[in-house]
Image (spheres, helix red, strand yellow):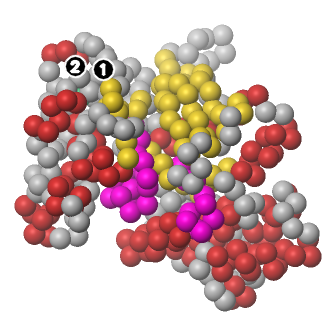
């Protein structure tokens, strides 16, 4: 598969404490040398705790945050070097679905007005066809019959319906890539599965690619082809979803897997948890050596001194851990093999 989006050594740093004539007191290294790629029609998950830099990465891909360094290429072209016309074409190809469907819709606009805006800006269809196109989009996302929704306002809908409207708005410009930032985490648990099923169906029917940002590996398993795990601005592990679930090669991934909720209370009680201690360190002054070492349950002396390089442990499966080769000896959640064997 050819790369649709390619990110190389991306850095997004934010100076803090700068005042007039006073230099910054420090730098938040929100994204600090991240590389990844997404193929046409592929779903890539970026996972990690709050503060790991995954949302900043998504914002940089969308051009909402200016990178400090590195390169973002879309279909081979450097996004930073685009002309205005090329940049407009890029925004037509790359769309976003935000976490909170309550905040991401204008409360003063009807659904028809919301959907007509991208249709008009990007000249997708003539103005006389806005209603018909909005109807098609609503039915595509499962809001049918569309006539019940078109002339109503966001406050008249549930969270799940609003997120469907947000997805319809993203689809209005017929994009190739959708950046979805925690698209189900603000929804009731009963609605999440419906939205995930919708995203999967749309991806298959329309051949879309997703950059799927989440802190929940349980969500990833049902939707994503590959996973990138971030910690404190860096990629610590990446691989195919089935490989990550069957045999994580980084203690941080192992701990994230152990934190996945289990629907079966017997398994939930029986499993061992690879729990993490302490908070995520400050990205202003990250720990020396391996950034994960103050919280790592299997850290040794070398970990605080030398930063581990990423090494390959199978096709596309890379881990940045000095002791990744010993992963089979780590304490694994007892449910893990059973789950992956389903
Ligand atoms: Fe843990 Fe050391 Fe591996 Fe870092 S390099 S994840 S501290 S074992």
Give the residue pinned by disc 1: 308
* 341 and 252: which is toward the camera: 341
Above or below: residue 24 compared with residue 204: above
Horizontal side of residue 41 vs 240, given as left or right: right
Percent position of residue 204, x then y: 55, 65
Q: In this rendering, which labeled residue sits more in front, label 1 or label 2?
A: 1
Instruction: Identify the element where label 2 is drawn.
Output: helix
Percent position of residue 47, x then y: 40, 46
Instruction: Identify the element where label 1 is drawn.
Output: loop
The answer to whether residue 102 is seen in the rendering is no
Which picture quadrant has residue 279? top left
Q: Quadrant of ligand 1?
A: top left
Q: Is mark 2 within 8 Å of ligand 1?
A: yes
Q: How many marks?
A: 2
Q: Are marks 1 and 2 in contact (CB under 8 Å)?
A: yes
Q: Residue at x 38, y 47 (%)?
A: 240
Q: Residue at x 23, y 17 (%)?
A: 304
Q: Residue at x 91, y 69 (%)?
A: 126
Give the residue pinned by disc 2: 303
Which picture quadrant has residue 265? bottom left
Q: Is mark 1 within 8 Å of ligand 1?
A: yes
Horizontal side of residue 150 vs 12, given as left or right: right
* 70 and 56: which is toward the camera: 70
* 88 and 59: which is toward the camera: 88
Q: Residue at x 24, y 58 (%)?
A: 340
Percent position of residue 290, x then y: 29, 22
Horizontal side of residue 301 vs 50, given as left or right: left
Residue 292 magenta: no
* 130 and 222: which is toward the camera: 222
First to last magenta residue range: 202-231
């Amino acid at each position: 598969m050819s790369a649709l989006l390619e990110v190389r050594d991306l850095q997004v740093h934010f100076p803090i404490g700068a005042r007039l004539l006073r230099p910054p007191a420090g730098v938040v290294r929100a994204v600090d040398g991240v590389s990844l790629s997404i193929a046409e029609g592929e779903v890539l998950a970026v996972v990690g705790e709050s503060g790991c830099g995954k949302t900043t990465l998504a914002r940089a891909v969308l051009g909402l945050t200016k990178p400090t360094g590195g390169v973002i290429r879309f279909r081979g072209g450097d996004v930073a070097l685009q002309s205005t016309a090329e940049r407009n074409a890029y925004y037509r190809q790359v769309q976003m679905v935000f976490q909170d469907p309550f905040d991401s819709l204008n409360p003063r606009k009807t659904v028809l007005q919301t959907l007509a805006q991208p249709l008009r800006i990007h000249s997708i269809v003539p103005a006389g066809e806005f209603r018909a196109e909005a109807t098609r989009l609503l039915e595509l996302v499962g809001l049918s019959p569309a006539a019940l929704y078109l002339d109503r306002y966001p406050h008249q809908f549930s969270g799940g319906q609003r997120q469907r409207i947000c997805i319809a708005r993203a689809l209005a410009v017929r994009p190739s890539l959708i950046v979805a930032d925690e698209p189900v985490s603000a929804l009731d648990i009963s609605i999440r599965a419906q939205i995930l099923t919708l995203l999967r169906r749309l991806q298959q029917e329309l051949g879309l690619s997703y950059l799927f940002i989440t802190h929940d590996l349980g969500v990833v398993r049902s939707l994503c082809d590959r996973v990138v795990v971030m910690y404190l601005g860096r990629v610590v592990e990446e691989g195919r979803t089935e490989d990550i679930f069957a045999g994580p090669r980084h203690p941080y991934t192992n701990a994230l897997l152990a934190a996945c909720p289990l629907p079966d209370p017997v398994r939930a009680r029986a499993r061992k948890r690879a729990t993490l201690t302490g908070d995520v360190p400050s990205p202003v002054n990250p720990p020396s050596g391996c950034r994960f070492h103050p919280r790592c349950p299997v850290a040794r002396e070398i970990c605080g001194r030398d930063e581990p390089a990423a090494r390959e442990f199978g096709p596309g499966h890379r881990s940045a851990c000095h002791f990744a080769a010993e992963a089979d000896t780590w304490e694994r959640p007892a449910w893990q093999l059973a789950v992956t064997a389903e």
